[in-house]
Amino acid sequence: MSFRVIILLVTVTLVFADQPFGKITLPLGKVDVQNSLKDAWKRAKPNQLVFEGNIIRTLQKSRCEITLTGGGKIRIGEQSELVLNQVSVKPMLKNFSANLKKGNIWVSAKAAFGEKKNISVRTPTAVAAIRGTKFRAKAGEDESSVLVYDGKVDVNQAKSVIERRKEMRKS
């Protein structure tokens, strides 16, 4: 293998190894980021990069906007907690997955011509998967809601909710 090929492989590996989920473009009020469940909460800063595994929480009278890698935005409402599960950004294909533990978010992710952009947001009771659209999701303990502003959103019950209902019917 030539030296140039090795350098190219190392560069490609580094670029795709630790892709940012996006960056915090507008933290308003008290917005905290936790790198993992073991780490302490730290105050979010404008233009701070966020990665898979990060948890973002907003306190009372606080909000946050994240600009996604490759385009699109997620706005997190007050008293919310969002876990950034997975990101995969490749040319013409962008996949994002997050878990809204509580509170509400607004998502806008239009796909460019020929591009595929998939964003799924899991709440305790449902999963919303979008294909280039705008929507709002709210996570409650017993139920979730999804409002679609533009485009198409697939909403399914979370697997745990389906299993609980089956158990209740058997009893």
Image (cartoon, rainbow, N blue to C red):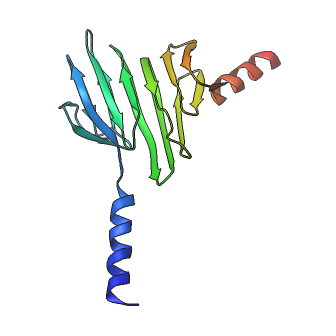
Residue at 57 percent of width and 31 percent of height: 130
Looking at the image, residue 54 sits to the left or right of residue 154; the answer is left
Q: Nearer the viewer, residue 28 or 132?
A: 132
Choose top left, top right, bottom left or bottom right for residue 44. Answer: top left
Image quarter where the C terminus lies is top right
Q: Is residue 119 above or below residue 141?
A: below
Outermost residue, right direction? 170
Choose top left, top right, bottom left or bottom right for residue 5. Answer: bottom left
Q: Position of residue 19 (x, y in %)?
A: 36, 51
Choose top left, top right, bottom left or bottom right for residue 3. Answer: bottom left
The mark total stands at: 0
Q: Position of residue 20 (x, y in %)?
A: 33, 46
Q: Is residue 96 above or below residue 73?
A: below
Looking at the image, residue 66 sits to the left or right of residue 163; the answer is left
Residue at 22 percent of width and 35 percent of height: 40
Residue at 46 percent of width and 44 percent of height: 86
Image quarter where the N terminus lies is bottom left
Q: Position of residue 72 (x, y in %)?
A: 41, 33
Residue at 56 percent of width and 17 percent of height: 148
Outermost residue, front direction? 113
Outermost residue, top direction? 61
Q: Position of residue 48 (x, y in %)?
A: 22, 38
Looking at the image, residue 159 sits to the left or right of residue 109; the answer is right
Q: Nearer the viewer, residue 62 or 75?
A: 75
